Image (cartoon, rainbow, N blue to C red):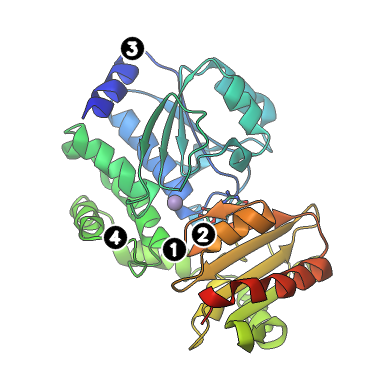
Amino acid sequence: MNQLIELKNLLSAFPRPRVVITTHHKPDADALGSSLGLLHFLIQLGVPAHVVSPTDYGDFLKWMPGEKEVVNFEKEKEKATALVAAADLIFCLDFNTLSRINLLGDMVANAKAKKILIDHHLEPEGFDDFRLWTTNASSTSELIFWMIELFNEVEKVNESIASCLYAGIMTDTASFKHNSTKPTTHRVAAKLLEKGAKPNRIHEAIYDNYSENRMRFIGYCLNEKMQILHDYRTALILVTAEELERFQIITGDTEGLVNYGLSITGIELSILVVDRTVARKMSFRSKSKFPANAFARKHFNGGGHFNAAGGESADDLQTIEKKLKHLLPEYIAYLN
Ligand code: 5GP
Ligand code: MN
């Protein structure tokens, strides 16, 4: 409660605050949905704001109301830099280490603005002045709704806010299936439906919106690229830069690919490694005991949630494959 008063005080400390909302690079539906949900809520409060994304994002998010106004730092460096430098308040959503916002990180760190962190990932780094943070929320979008409820402003939730937040909750829980789906998650989702979110339309816009290439690429990866390491109950897919080019893979197209391996009976860990040329991006998903975040943090400069984590490597794919196969025996106790 004290926290809430502190946040309210922060918001009212500036009569006409200049507000920037930012989120992690390659934003997913929770990152962008929470950002745009908050944007529309602030507009309802009479506080204009700008959403600044460190990078581009998948086409399947471009239906979100307000998306066209998002400033992509990679494309509009000067505008993004000026907005961050001039801001009184910077909301940092769905990330808690500045490395997750790439080159924007230093700018946010050096900005005179007060930084408000709203996030549900483990171990915040501590660059924030204020935080609404818990790992008990399914998503940052759910946290934005909690904040609106705590402010006693639920009547201001309109269809735009509801749709953006519903999208974030739906995707971060993998359609209400992850263990992070609590009774409260469904209560929040129910309220968002009452406020006009259309579950079928949102689901369709995100999940039934693949290009033909993307679908064929998934088929190719599952049929020809997936290795099953039976001794370690692990599924592994390594995608080369050449394959990305051959299938004309664009931002967002590899999202969700790592989950397929986990659908196999007995598989406890699924790993996807994608050669993004500048670096190899890694995704880890596990079913129960395997600590995906600790593994990513210790060996691949990453982190995340217990069962869903990511990381990066400067090594080539072959070296990564060798390293993984060398490491897995150490983790056998978590994989049986
Ligand atoms: P994904 O595999 O979908 O890229 O990421 C899954 C989760 O892992 C994300 O929600 C995020 O929490 C975390 N994650 C992904 N990549 C990184 C990374 O490079 N560093 C950290 N700290 N976390 C990551
Ligand atoms: Mn999230």
- State the SS at label 3: loop
| Residue matched to label 1 | 205
Which of the two discs, 3 and 1, labels the residue nearer the N terminus? 3
> In what quadrant does ligand 1 lie?
bottom right
Say whether mark 3 is within 8 Å of ligand 2: no
- State the SS at label 2: helix
Q: Where is residue 14 in the image (x, y as percent from the top left)?
A: 36, 12
What kind of residue is marked 3? Ala
- Residue at image position (48%, 39%) is 124
Spatial CA distance of label 1 from label 2 is: 6 Å
**CB atoms of marks 4 and 2 within 8 Å:** no
Does the image show residue 246?
no
Which of the two discs, 1 and 2, labels the residue nearer the N terminus? 2
- Residue at image position (46%, 68%) is 207
| Residue matched to label 4 | 198
What kind of residue is marked 4? Lys
Spatial CA distance of label 3 from label 1 is: 39 Å
| Residue matched to label 2 | 60
